[in-house]
Amino acid sequence: MTKMKTIVDDLLRTIQSPSTSIHELRDIWESRSLAIWLNHPELHAALTLRLQHRSHPFWVFEITDEGKQCEACNDEIFTQLTRTAALSLARTGATRSAMEMLNKLLEKGSPQAETFCLLGRLQKDVAYTAKAGEKRKQHLQSAFSYYSRAVELEPDNYYPLINTATVALLLGNKNEASIVDEQVIALCQKQIEGNDDYWLLATLAEAQLLLRNTDKAGAHYRAAAEKVGHEYSSLQSMRSQARQILNAQDQDPSLLDSTFLMPRVVVFSGHRIDAAERSTPRFPPSAVAEVSRNISTTVANSTPMIAYASAAPGGDLIFCEAVLKNGNELRLVLPFDLKNFRTYILQSADADWLQRFDWVAARATSIVTASSGKHHEQIQGSAIYDFVNRLILGLARFESRFLETSLQTIALWDQVGLTVTGGTADCIALWQSVGLTVDTIIDPSGAPLLPVHQSPDLIKLDRSSSQNKNEQQIKAILFADIVGYSKLEDYDLPRYYDSFLKPIAESIARFDFAPLTSNCWGDAFYFVFDSVREAGLFALEFHRAIEQQDWLPQSTGKKLHFRIALNAGPVFELRDPVTGTLNFTGQHTNRAARIEPMVQEGQIYVSEYFAALASVEQIDEFALDYVGYRPLPKKYGSSRVFILRAPQ
């Protein structure tokens, strides 16, 4: 046995072992040797099998994306990874892209039942989100067709059979649904003995529900839910299907909701531990023990949960520890990378807090950092902490929407008004500004924990008073490039400016949202906006204005297209001393510029930061489809990117 084979076999055993935790799987992925992984796509396949039903669609897609590019990726592994990638895309909301991926897979080889089943599921998901009417019916008919083709290929496979029955019911064909359900129950009963597959139990539950045996359905769903563990995507899928069936039967869609113990998605904000020089106590070290007990009680009462928080010494770390010790998943969002976080946030704290941070960071299922590089708070201000609060809320709202579960807010707060941008009070003001309330308030002085309904009425906080115009501010930045401009001859340029750029400028001038600043370098454009909503809508209008141009350069005779990139984050507002124009600069301006060259021709790409801030505002005037984790030019790291498009 070669050394390489031994390493790969050991990795496979570790990945496939049920005892390997989610944070250990994350460590395996983040510390992987590309020399090994890029030659062994079976590692990617094994890891995605462990993760595909967890609530990590972005991560799963990144793994499949790398695996499919391996030279050693054979047809079987490529097909498996493509199916998993499509399912992950659909879970992020990019259903259209997922369907395109699966259809290309069908074009490459012979039809396979599993691919038809996935296409049926995607059509069914689209139907579930569509309003009642012809469009919903068309998607259900397409789903029925795909599932029926899968049944033809594998007539004894209970999965396409049960879905054919469910879709038949949703289309109004109750007799066909009943006939198939009896067949499904018989198939499942043959396999149930000694089988640990929770989908088998869920299928029995669905069949009984279709036959209106609600009690039997509930019993099977409960048995399935007990086996699911943290595979919350599977639990959400079961519940969604049950709701659709109950609704089609004119029953209460939420009748069986209590059967599915779905996690809450929780966001936390809390005060740091008091520094030694603080004159007025707020969260003194003497209160840590009592506050820890109160936070632990709150977390225990909210378990299971998926928690989003930062990790400053004090309330953040105490909350994170309680989340992990109660067996929940933790998503960390930090203002800086781990090295700089230790330098700027933990350096002045007691050594105990640093050890606690290392313990938490090692067990978090994901860590998002809001910036890279060094930070000078006296110059840059505290906008970065406001940005972190927004990222936490945006990412949590995204996951809450994906799992169709509740979003809960918990704060360790002294209930004093705003004092600093990005602090706890400012975070609560952010929650209030988007229609959220504080579900639980914990007193940092260590006072007894109050039930939610006994908590004092919150003061309404005005965030505008906490903004300092001399510091960095959160803005949305757009860069665009005209593809093919460099191939124009000099004699093309006068008409390019008059026949191509001028109509675009006129269209921009009519737009509802004027950019804070703008610039143009012939083929390159730069705009800055106050909000991601303004920037996103402007990008769509800019896209339309360019695509409507029918001018063809005399030298090439080819239509000009574009690339557009959007990012959001803290930047400085400065007046250029050379040109006198207003400018917005900082690393997040640079990030937008780095995304633009990787954009596919004719597309609009946005960063994960932009997508998270759009999620905060729950914008429905444009849609975002996940593209993947992509390296940025000029050694600027990597970024999750999304396509921005008009809603369907």
Image (cartoon, helix red, strand yellow):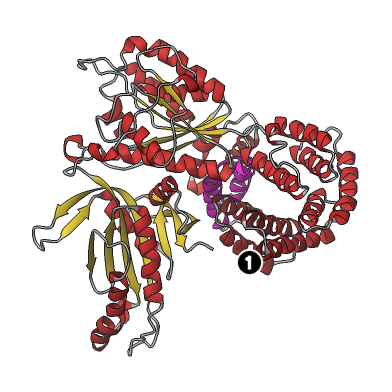
Q: Main secondary structure of the magenta part?
A: helix
Please tell me in which quadrant of the rendered image residue 4 appears.
top right
Q: Quadrant of the N terminus?
A: top right
Which residue, as the protein is rendered here, is positioned at the far left? 577
> Which sits in the foreground, 205 or 99?
205
Q: Which residue is mark 1?
A: 104
Instruction: Name the spot of residue 392 as percent of width and height, x first.
Output: 41, 38
Instruction: Name the spot of residue 148 as percent of width and height, x first.
Output: 80, 61
Q: Which residues are magenta?
A: 41-69
Which residue, as the protein is rendered here, is positioned at the far top? 286
Please tell me in which quadrant of the rendered image residue 371 appears.
top left
Secondary element at image label 1: helix
Q: Is residue 495 above or below residue 591?
A: below
Instruction: Name the spot of residue 265 as percent of width and height, x first.
Output: 52, 35
Q: Give left or right: position of 594 versus 153.
A: left
Q: Give left or right: position of 377 versus 453.
A: left
Check if residue 54 falls in the magenta segment: yes
Examine the rendering and report whether any part of residue 164 can be seen.
Answer: yes
> Which sits in the foreground, 418 or 187?
418
> Which sits in the foreground, 246 or 310?
246
Amino acid type indicated by mark 1: Lys
Neighbours of disc 1 within 10 Å: few (<14), some (14-19), many (20+): few
Check if residue 232 falls in the magenta segment: no
The residue shown at (42%, 23%) is 441
Number of disc labels: 1
The residue shown at (55%, 46%) is 57
Instruction: Name the spot of residue 512 as percent of width and height, x first.
Output: 32, 64
Examine the rendering and report whether any part of residue 595 can be seen.
Answer: no
